[in-house]
Amino acid sequence: MPLSRQCLAELLGTMVLLATVIGSGIMAERLSGGNIALALLANTAATVGALYVLIEALGAISGAHFNPVVSAVLALRGELAWWHVGPFIAAQLLGAVLGAWLANAMFDLNVFQLSMKVRSSQGQWLSEAVATAGLLLTILRAPTGKASAMVAAYIGAAYWFTASTSFANPAAVFGRMFSDSFAGIAPASAPGFVAAEMVGGVVAMGLAHWLRNPRGQAVALPSVFDPPQSKGTKGF
């Protein structure tokens, strides 16, 4: 698969994912009448649905990472060429910004804006490390063909069991800075989230290694990232 096509898939997937997260947050906030729990529930449902569809649709092209930590971890594990990492991350970050601008435009907000929503506490940083570790471990341990459903289900759950509502993705953090809305994050809060997500990625790599059998071989489950052999996605 040409690298240009893979990068386009990463850009489009991340763009639609961020447009979904931010746009559904704006819609939910407008319709919920101040009920934050209801708004979060609607935001969660939209994100889970879009994430599943995007992984199914684009997984066979680029692996459907949509996440710099995923790309970096796969490169460290030897499952993604290192010379793909830079272009993938650039495409993901650009897609995230475009997705934020698209959501702003669809809801008649100023397209170019920065979030003022502060998200900064030890609990939220810990939450991001936990959310990211869980996401990567889900990806690395999912049986072939089940990654899309498992990743979507995990993110849906993590929206509710983490104090940060589970960004679990530096590209998502970057994109959310450009919308002062329900799903936004202030630029000053972003470095803490990204650092915690990187820690979570390292933890997931360690856990994935230790969850191998005593001879150092993986438990007899197909790799999530094996080349597609039948209908369905193999990556995220």
Image (spheres, rainbow, N blue to C red):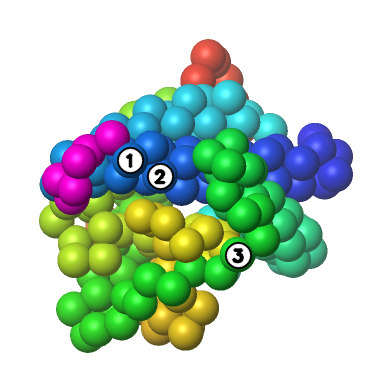
Whichever of labels 2 and 3 marks the residue nearer the N terminus, that label is 2
Q: Amino acid at mark 2?
A: Ile
Q: Is residue 76 above or below residue 230?
A: below
Residue located 48% across and 25% down the image: 53
Callouts 2 and 1 close, C-beta under 8 Å: yes
Residue located 42% across and 57% down the image: 181
User: Mostly what secondary structure, the magenta segment?
Assistant: loop
Q: Nearer the viewer, residue 223 or 113?
A: 113
Secondary element under disc 2, as helix, strand or loop, is helix
Which residue has dot 2 on it? 26
Secondary element under disc 1, as helix, strand or loop, is helix
Callouts 2 and 3 close, C-beta under 8 Å: no
Callout 1: 10 Å neighbours few (<14), some, many (20+)? few
* The quadrant where residue 58 appears: top right
Which residue has dot 3 on it? 113
Q: Is residue 32 magenta?
A: yes
Distance of label 2 from label 1 (alpha carbons)? 6 Å
* The quadrant where residue 217 appears: bottom left
The answer to whether 155 appears left or right of 77 in the picture is: left
Which residue has dot 1 on it? 30
Q: Is residue 5 magenta?
A: no
Q: Which residues are drawn in magenta?
A: 31-36
Asked if residue 48 can be seen in this view, the reply is no
Callout 2: 10 Å neighbours few (<14), some, many (20+)? many
Distance of label 3 from label 1 (alpha carbons)? 19 Å
Residue 151 is labelled as none
| Mark closer to the observer (2, 1) | 1
Residue located 38% across and 37% down the image: 27
Q: Amino acid at mark 3?
A: Gln
